[in-house]
């Protein structure tokens, strides 16, 4: 006999047959796909085939019910319970069980929902001859799940319980947490263990006992008894088991387990984590096998979980992503790696304190877990960076939906201390195997996509594309060109005057760095200053700006002109470093220039990063006689309340607020209030980006002190500034009369 049997034949096609005992091809069950009545997806065929093989060799009656229609296949022992003249494989389970169906229907529905059930004391003799013979049996219904944790079949078996004369009760009950001995698990060629939350071994099958050298049923009572002594009762080990159910649904790991003879063998373990009906940890199910080769065992000394959020950490990431990639290979679906971080988390952390920063991380971790599907996993990689492993991805829209759920959940306002905080994140995504076939490249591509998402704004997601790799190459080339720009003297200074609204005279100017790019022409600092910080060029640029401004001031003084103060922009890295104060002190001592000629201008966002150090640095600089300006006010987290604790002389309102003050009443109100409160704190107010006479009139009426923008003058080269001053009538004694 060869090939697959004809499923239309009434006799059970999985029974042992004379002459076929040694013929593996003949003994194998037919492939379910050959039967048009078996509604099983192709990805489930191998699993179903293995279950049918187990059923064939089981001595107890076994029936496999497939799909929502519960189409049945069964072994010879089950066939013996039935009237062979009336039934054949392919019948539905309700038709197969006939008069017993009403008694087992609830149990079947329970199993279809993923919960095993047992109906005790049924008279199966009714199915064969319509009469009760006094022999009663239990009907056991076990759900069979695919890789997506979805029930696609039922493993139904009949167990003899003894004799009885009273009619059976129509009851069904789910089993307790402990798995009872059953031939299905004992016939499996792999070790099975059921482990409680306390690491007690609730059940082990015959294969597990044999693997570790124990007689069936005599395996140790606690998992710790199987692990090396160094791994017992360690806090890391306890934390590992405590956190498993709150971080992932399944994973694989190698463990050293103690053989009965005292030696340790390396086992490969697939672990599924089961929750009870209330969503609380119930037990872990181990599927174990020996590796057959030396492997690196799990070390309990390596922390796999983040103590702050109880999420898996960077040490566990490779294992979890690797497992998910294997699942994707088996299922034929894609895997998405979502890399995200909290925008401006460092600012929140420094301004509100590390305790509230930690609370924010715990809250974000909780929201991530609540927004994900059961098959997804979230990892904290470090600081404010998280990874979401999203499995079973059929199309890009699946990932977009997952990302939308995450963004919607995270963006809800949170209360930290006495502060209401809005959370925004940037998210990058790479797909396996579409974008890459190894873990490191997947993470790298997700990070590149995340960087692109940050450029697009808050709460954005970007999918990796090969064009992004080209952009990264372009960035590397830009870094190289920027490094050469300093050596080739391509940097130059421009100056933009500020107009006093009280006197109508020029009251100061801002020094603006420009890059005279050989191909792109004049490039503003905003286009390259972040890149300069990234590649470590910012200190040299800062020294260049300070030296250039000092040199220009001395030129004007030598020409008999009296300069106005020049504001110099300082980056966050310079502000937090020790060399800024040293450079300013050295400059004043060596040149003899008055400190009143200099202003230090810092952006609002730089204030919150290491606030105490920034405050001390600004205080020291101000003691030298140099004035301090706060730039771009209104674009960050700060408020006038905490600015009162800073040694600042000028407050510059960002151009975003000025642009619409004539037509937008709300914006006008904000600007007016800012001017009033800044004056109450002893600060003068400078409005940036003034371009029209109407804006000028509004600001003058509200008491603004100075304006800066194209309505006064665009940024000018030193020679252009001289022409400008001559045009507005500043002659003879200098460019500008100081206030």
Image: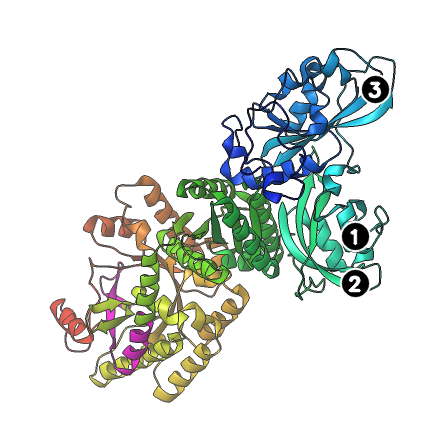
Where does the image place residue 169, in percent across and percent down from the top left?
Answer: 80, 15
Name the residue at 77% across, 45% down.
Answer: 205
Lower sequence index among marks 2 and 1 = 1
- Label 2, on which residue? 228
Residue 4 on the magenta span: no
- The way the protein has been coloured in the rendering is rainbow
Lower sequence index among marks 1 and 3 = 3
Other residues around mark 2 within 10 Å, as few (<14) / some (14–19) / many (≥20): some
- Label 3, on which residue? 135
Q: Is residue 279 visible?
A: no
How far, Cα to Cα, is label 1 from label 3? Answer: 34 Å
Residue 131 sits above or below residue 45 on the image: above
Proximity of marks 1 and 3: CB atoms separated by less than 8 Å: no
- Label 1, on which residue? 210
Q: Which residues are magenta?
A: 478-507
Residue 497 on the magenta span: yes
Q: Quadrant of residue 307?
A: bottom right
SS of the residue under disc 3: strand
Which residue of the protein is positioned furthest toward the bottom in this rendering? 590
């Amino acid at each position: 006999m060869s090939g697959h049997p004809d499923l239309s034949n009434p006799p059970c096609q999985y029974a042992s047959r004379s002459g076929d005992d040694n013929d593996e091809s003949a003994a194998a069950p037919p492939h379910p796909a050959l039967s048009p009545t078996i509604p099983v997806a192709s990805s489930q065929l191998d699993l179903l085939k293995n279950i049918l093989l187990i059923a064939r060799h089981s001595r107890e009656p076994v029936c496999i019910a497939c799909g929502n229609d519960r189409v049945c296949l069964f072994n010879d022992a089950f066939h013996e319970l039935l009237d062979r003249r009336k039934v054949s494989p392919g019948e539905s389970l309700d038709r197969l069980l006939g008069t017993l169906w009403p008694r087992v229907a609830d149990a079947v529905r329970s199993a279809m929902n993923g919960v095993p059930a047992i109906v005790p004391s049924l008279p199966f003799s009714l199915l064969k001859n319509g009469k009760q013979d006094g022999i009663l049996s239990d009907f056991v219904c076990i759900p069979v799940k695919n890789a997506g944790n979805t029930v696609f079949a039922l493993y139904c078996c009949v167990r003899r319980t003894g004799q009885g004369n009273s009619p059976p009760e129509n009851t069904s009950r789910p089993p307790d947490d402990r798995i009872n001995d059953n031939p299905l698990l004992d016939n499996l060629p792999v070790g099975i263990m059921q482990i409680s939350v306390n690491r007690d071994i609730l059940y082990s099958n015959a294969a597990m006992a044999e693997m570790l050298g124990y007689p069936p049923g005599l395996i140790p009572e606690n998992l710790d008894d199987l692990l090396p002594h160094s791994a017992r009762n360690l806090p890391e080990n306890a934390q590992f088991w405590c956190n498993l159910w709150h971080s992932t649904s399944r994973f694989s790991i190698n463990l050293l387990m103690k053989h009965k003879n005292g030696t340790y063998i390396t086992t490969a373990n697939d672990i599924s984590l089961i929750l009870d009906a209330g969503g609380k940890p119930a037990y872990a199910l181990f599927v174990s096998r020996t590796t057959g080769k030396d492997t690196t065992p799990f070390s309990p000394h390596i922390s796999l979980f983040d103590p702050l959020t109880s999420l898996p950490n960077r040490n566990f990431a490779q294992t979890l992503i690797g497992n998910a990639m294997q699942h994707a290979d088996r299922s034929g679906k894609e895997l998405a790696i979502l890399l995200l971080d909290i925008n401006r988390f460092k600012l929140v952390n420094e301004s509100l304190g590390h305790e509230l920063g930690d609370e924010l991380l715990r809250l974000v971790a909780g929201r991530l877990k609540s927004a994900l599907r059961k098959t997804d996993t979230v990892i904290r990689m470090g600081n404010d960076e998280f990874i979401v492993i999203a499995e079973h991805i059929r199309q890009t829209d699946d990932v977009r939906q997952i990302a939308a759920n995450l963004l919607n959940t995270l963006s809800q306002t949170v209360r930290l201390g006495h502060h209401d905080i809005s959370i925004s994140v940037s998210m990058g995504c790479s797909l396996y195997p579409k974008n890459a076939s190894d873990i490191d490249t997947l993470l790298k591509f997700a990070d590149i996509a995340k960087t692109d998402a940050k450029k697009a704004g808050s709460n954005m997601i970007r999918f990796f594309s090969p064009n992004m790799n080209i952009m990264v190459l372009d960035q590397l080339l830009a870094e190289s060109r920027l490094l050469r720009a300093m050596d080739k003297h391509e940097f130059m200074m421009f100056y933009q005057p500020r107009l006093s609204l009280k006197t109508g005279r020029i009251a100061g100017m801002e020094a603006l760095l420009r890059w005279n790019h050989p191909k792109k022409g004049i490039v503003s600092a905003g286009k390259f200053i972040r890149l300069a910080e990234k590649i470590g060029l910012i200190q040299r640029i800062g020294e260049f700006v300070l030296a250039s401004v000092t040199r220009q001031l001395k030129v004007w003084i030598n020409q008999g002109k009296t300069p106005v103060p020049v504001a110099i922009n300082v980056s966050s890295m310079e502000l937090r470093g020790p060399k800024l104060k040293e450079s300013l002190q050295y400059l004043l001592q060596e040149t003899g220039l008055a400190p009143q000629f200099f202003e230090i201008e810092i952006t609002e966002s730089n204030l919150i990063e290491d606030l105490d150090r920034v405050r001390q640095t600004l205080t020291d600089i101000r003691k030298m006689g140099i004035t301090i300006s706060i730039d771009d006010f209104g674009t960050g987290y700060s408020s006038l309340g905490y600015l009162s604790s800073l040694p600042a002389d000028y407050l510059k309102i960002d151009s975003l607020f000025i642009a619409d003050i004539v037509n937008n009443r709300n914006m006008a109100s904000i600007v007016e209030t800012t001017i009033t409160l800044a004056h109450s704190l002893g600060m003068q107010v400078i409005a940036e980006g003034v371009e029209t006479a109407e804006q000028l009139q509004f600001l003058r009426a509200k008491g603004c002190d100075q304006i800066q923008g194209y309505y006064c003058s665009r940024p000018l080269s030193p020679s252009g500034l001289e022409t400008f001053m001559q045009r507005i009538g500043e002659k003879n004694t200098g460019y500008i009369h100081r206030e």
